[in-house]
Amino acid sequence: MVGTTSFILNRKILSGPGSTLAAVATIQKEDRVLVIISKSVFTHAGTLILEPLAKIDVIFFACPVTGEPTDTTIDDIVRTYYGEQISTVIGVGGGSALDTAKAVSAMLRERKLTASY
């Protein structure tokens, strides 16, 4: 029998057309942002999200991803950015990038790896 699993939810999840710019508008200068981007849109990500983040002078990290998220992918990203005190995770691109962003956000907030679940 599998036990109950729970996660601490993030304060805000934005989705849909225009949500990327709406997310940038909510970011404070003291935030530390992880942007998870589908590699298929990475070349356009500069004008879409990275340049606006640079303009508000916030610390951010860009993490390109491909394919469906796996436990290994999520854990690798969490290990890489765990010490960066990420306060905001933004997913840009298709469903795989968004799924990865949601999972990474949850694991960073829980301070655990997927094997814990």
Image: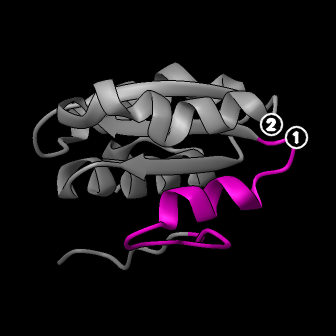
Q: Amino acid at mark 2?
A: Ile
75 sits to left or right of 107: left
Q: Is residue 115 magenta?
A: no
**Does label 1 or label 2 sit earlier along the sequence?**
1
| Viewer-proximal residue among 4 and 44 | 44
Mark nearest the camera among 1 and 2 is 2
Q: Residues within 10 Å of mark 2 (few under 14, many from 20)?
A: few
Q: Which mark is residue 56?
A: 2
Residue shown at the point (12%, 46%) measured from the top left? 68
Packing grade of label 1 (10 A; few <14, some 14-19, many >=20) is few
The dominant secondary structure in magenta is loop
Image position, residue 23 (x, y; %): 61, 60
Foreground residue among 98 and 4: 98
- Considering only vertical position in the picture, is 30 above or below 22? above
Residue 89 image point, x, y percent: 55, 48
Looking at the image, is 101 positioned above or below residue 4? Answer: above
Q: CA distance from mark 1 to mark 2?
A: 7 Å
Circles 1, 2 touching at the beta carbon (< 8 Å): yes
The amino acid on which the numbered mark 1 sits, given as a three-letter code, is Lys
The quarter of the displayed image where residue 43 is located: top left
